[in-house]
Image (spheres, rainbow, N blue to C red):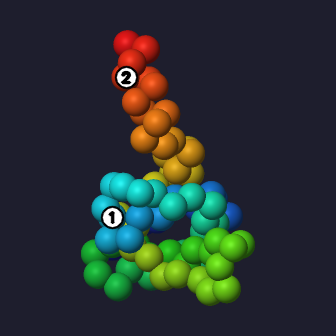
Amino acid sequence: MHSHFYALGQQVSYAEDGIAWPWKGGFEVIALLPASTDEPAYRIRNAEQAYDRIVSEHELSEHIRATRTRSFDKELTCRR
């Protein structure tokens, strides 16, 4: 069994089924759950939603990635 990468209370971004775009930010890890398969699981919460989500680790990213937008990435590309 693998240990959890994200910590309790950590701000994370969520992408359903691990699809890289769009990441939805503003989630907080509120519980570390046992792995149902070979991958750790988490309970996450977004203050704007009335429910929690149970997600696998591959569906999460560190919160900083959620702040990037397509226009931000395009701007970075143009500056190079």
Return the residue found at the far right: 47
In the image, is residue 4 above or below residue 35?
above
Tell me where residue 34 sits by quadrant.
Answer: bottom left
Residue in the picture at 52% in, 81% down: 53
Residue type at the position of mark 2: Thr
Q: Is residue 67 left or right of residue 79?
A: right
Q: Residue lying furthest left in this view?
A: 38
Image-quadrant location for residue 43: bottom right
Q: Which residue is mark 1?
A: 18
Q: Which mark is residue 77?
A: 2
Dot 1 or dot 2, earlier in sequence? 1
Among the 4 quarters of the image, the one containing residue 76:
top left
Are dots 1 and 2 in contact, CB under 8 Å?
A: no
Q: Amino acid at mark 1?
A: Gly
Where is residue 30 drawn, in percent x and y? 64, 74
Give percent across and percent down for residue 37. Answer: 29, 81
Check the image and name the residue furthest to the top.
80
Q: Is residue 65 visible?
A: yes
Looking at the rendered structure, the number of numbered marks drawn on it comes to 2
- Horizontal and vertical percent position of residue 31: 60, 77
